[in-house]
Image (cartoon, helix red, strand yellow):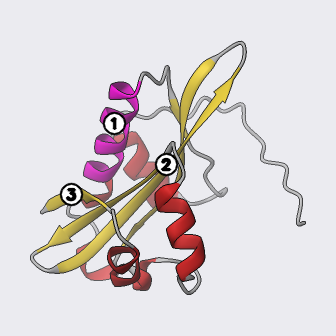
Amino acid sequence: MQIRRAATVAEVAAAAHLFDHPVRTEWAKRFLTTAGHHLLLAYEGPAVAGFVSGVETVHPDKGTEMFLYELAVAEPYRRRGIGRALVERLAALARERGCYGMWVGVDTGNDVALAAYRSAGGEDDGTCTVVTWVL
């Protein structure tokens, strides 16, 4: 397995099978060119097996932390440590960029995701409820 940062819209498009919705060229381009946005792709040979995306968030009294936005691994490649490796690589990138921490929201009952995050050193602090707005 090889993990590389996505640098082109074509690379993102090649990973389209991993996203929840179709990749839109203008959004992919914006993501890739926005400072503090990161998309790491895991390859098994020529196939894109998984991805993790992260966004740096900065606050005046806290500094910068990494928000792990999304993690996906294609079905044939699951349970091989790819998710863990992607999360660990994003955490390493966060450290390199001076982030003081990294966090992710996980859907209630998503035991597979929780297992991947825990295997990469993450801890569930049991204190988070996600409140959303549809705009």
Q: Is residue 39 left or right of residue 42?
A: right
Q: Is residue 101 left or right of residue 42?
A: right
Q: Earlier in the sequence, mark 1 or mark 3?
A: 3
- Residue 70 appears in the rendering: no
Vertical arrangement, residue 64 with respect to residue 90, above or below: above
Q: Which mark is residue 80?
A: none
Percent x, y of residue 33: 49, 57
Q: In the rendered image, which residue does mark 1 sit on?
A: 93
Q: Amino acid at mark 3?
A: Ile
Q: In the rendered image, which residue does mark 2 sit on?
A: 54
Which quadrant does the N terminus fall into?
Answer: bottom left
Vertical arrangement, residue 88 with respect to residue 48, above or below: above
Q: Secondary structure at mark 3?
A: strand
Q: Which residues are magenta?
A: 84-97
Q: Is residue 93 left or right of residue 81?
A: right
Extreme residue in the top direction:
61
Q: Amino acid at mark 2?
A: Gly
